[in-house]
Amino acid sequence: MKIELLFPEVCGLYGDAQNYEYLKKSLPDAEFIVTDFLSTPYFFEKDPDIICIGSMSEEMQRKVLDKFRPRKDRINELIEKGTVILATGNAAELFCEKIEYITEKKETEGLGVFPLTAKTDLFKRYNGKVLGECDGIEIVGFRAQFSFIYGDNSDCFFLKMIRGDGINKESGFEGMRKNNLMCTTCLGPILPLNPLFTEYIISLAGGSEKAAFREEAMSAYEKRLAEFHDPKVKF
């Protein structure tokens, strides 16, 4: 199995790169590829089994899109093939049709995988918890963002929310999904927090390995799950 981490030096805010590190622990026999921003991504020419990209600044978001746009056909090819792509935080917005930067009075064309628009306002920060369901697996997570995504994702969502907001405060569906492309606004180490989801990701890529430190990870997951289900806990 081959796993590529994209641009960790500029797309690793909020500890998102720990998803990749957890996969390394869970898949000790896999080949791991780290691509810095100045290099050509492995996936441009070859077929990794899993691609990870994490949160970034707004300026870097535009630069990543400039790098990716000429290879939109290749990205769509991988999505259609069923390559597992995990985009966390505002990396999820790369796959929208458009991103509007309200504070900076700019907008940029996204990759257009989903007919949605992201709107970023640097004067309005949103913090929240996530409790949702993906293919029968309950997912816990955290969000800290300046943007929301608008449009109808009811037929292309990543999580059906149990508690918390979806892609915006009026939505009950978080993130986006097409085949094995999973885009979520959850930040940080979503895989270590959710060992069952980690195993699901591995299975989609053709593996059968268990999540690393499974006993400890499951204990922590079950405690957080109980906490997030508690109606006294604010979202």
Image (cartoon, rainbow, N blue to C red):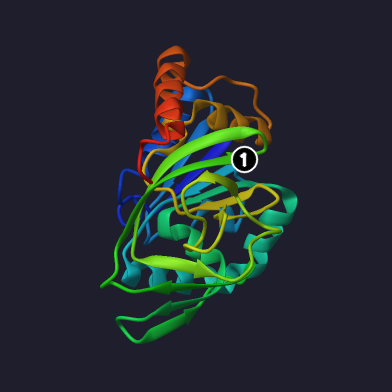
Q: Is residue 14 left or right of residue 213?
A: left
For the residue marked with disc 1, what is the amino acid? Cys
Residue 189, image x and y in percent? Answer: 39, 38
Q: 56 or 63: which is nearer to us?
A: 56
Would you place residue 36 above or below residue 203 in this image? below
Residue 209, image x and y in percent? Answer: 59, 20
Identify the residue shown where x is 44% and y is 66%: 148
Callout 1 secondary element = strand
Residue 232, image x and y in percent? Answer: 36, 35
Q: Is residue 17 left or right of residue 182?
A: left
Q: Locate residue 142: give its quadrant.
A: top left
Residue 1 visible, this angle: no
Residue at the extreme top = 215
Residue 100 visible, this angle: yes
Identify the residue shown where x is 66% and y is 33%: 136
Identify the residue shown where x is 39% and y is 33%: 21
Q: 180 or 100: which is nearer to us?
A: 100
**In this figure, what is the number of numbered marks?**
1
Q: Is residue 96 left or right of residue 225?
A: right
Would you place residue 223 above or below residue 94 in this image? above
Near mark 1 (Cα within 10 A), the count class, few <14, some 14-19 or many ≥20, is some
Q: Locate residue 34: give its quadrant.
A: top left
Residue at the extreme bottom = 105
Would you place residue 144 above or below residue 111 in this image? above
Residue 36, image x and y in percent? Answer: 37, 54
Name the residue beneath numbered marker 1: 134
Which image quarter is the N terminus in? top right
Residue at the extreme left = 123
Residue at the extreme front = 232
